[in-house]
Image (spheres, helix red, strand yellow):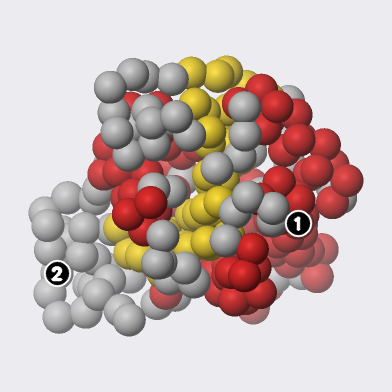
Amino acid sequence: MVQGIGQDAGAALLSGRCAIVAMPGLPLGRALARGLRRHGARVVEVDVAPGSCADAEKALGHAAREAGGADLFVHAGATPAALASRPLEVLSGEEWHAAVHRSMLASLYFLQGVYRQQHEAGGATVLVGPSVALVGAAGLVPLITLAEAQRTLVKSAARQWGRHGMRLNWVGVGAQRYAGSLAGAALPPTPELGPPPPALGRVPDAESDVADVIAWLGSDGARGVTGASFNLDGGDWMVP
């Protein structure tokens, strides 16, 4: 299902560009869509989790027609099972499949669909994950594994598709921005050399701070940036 088109005038970074935001089941997508509209993009939201490459192609093709193109694709994907906290030692194969494999396949299918939309004219893609994936968290092994797999997928696709003018990057956000259900998760309490809060004193807001960086990644100003990982957690985890 494709959700609302919208566009705000007067912003420059994405003026005249078309963006597709696909974050099925994650409220984060709605916040980022609002932020991208503020930058002048014509935005279509996709709330379907594809079960095949054909499903993704159909959803993205419809969204691109609605938006008028697919200059920027923004995606985050995690099933409810991936967001659940549970001890590693009791995870079953069925739980792992529901949490990791299903989510990862949806991301793979989406990227395959994006390739078909962007391989002729080029474009930008941003995958979003929780920044804590870079360091790990007790009880969230499926989500951490999924996020790192998605980040690796971005780097591999960026190298393969760069010749088509396609740029792909990964953005890590604060866990509670990624999914509200993670606010009570057993996250590492002491980032690196100092106690919380983050170095900047707050977790960057999705609609403003995170959307600003994604808008830049979708603009001509970032035309030399691909295969990169950006941490937008306010300085919680300062890792390479």
Q: Quadrant of residue 14?
A: top left
In-image side of 221 versus 193 (left or right)? right
* Apparent side of residue 230 relative to residue 85 in the rendered image (left or right): left
Splitting the image into 4 quarters, where does residue 71 fall? Answer: top right
Secondary structure of the residue carrying numbered label 1: helix
Residue 30 on image: x %, y %? 48, 30
Residue 204 horizontal/vertical position (percent): 25, 48
Above-or-below relation of 36 to 166: above
The kind of residue tagged 1 is: Gln
Left or right, 31 with reference to 118: left
The amino acid on which the numbered mark 2 sits, given as a three-letter code, is Pro
Local secondary structure at mark 2 = loop
Q: Using the image, determine if residue 57 lies above or below residue 189.
A: above
The residue at the point 32 percent across, 39 percent down is 13
- Can the viewer see residue 101 in this picture? yes
> Can you say which quadrant of the picture contains the C terminus?
bottom left
| Residue at point 80%, 43% (across, down) | 57
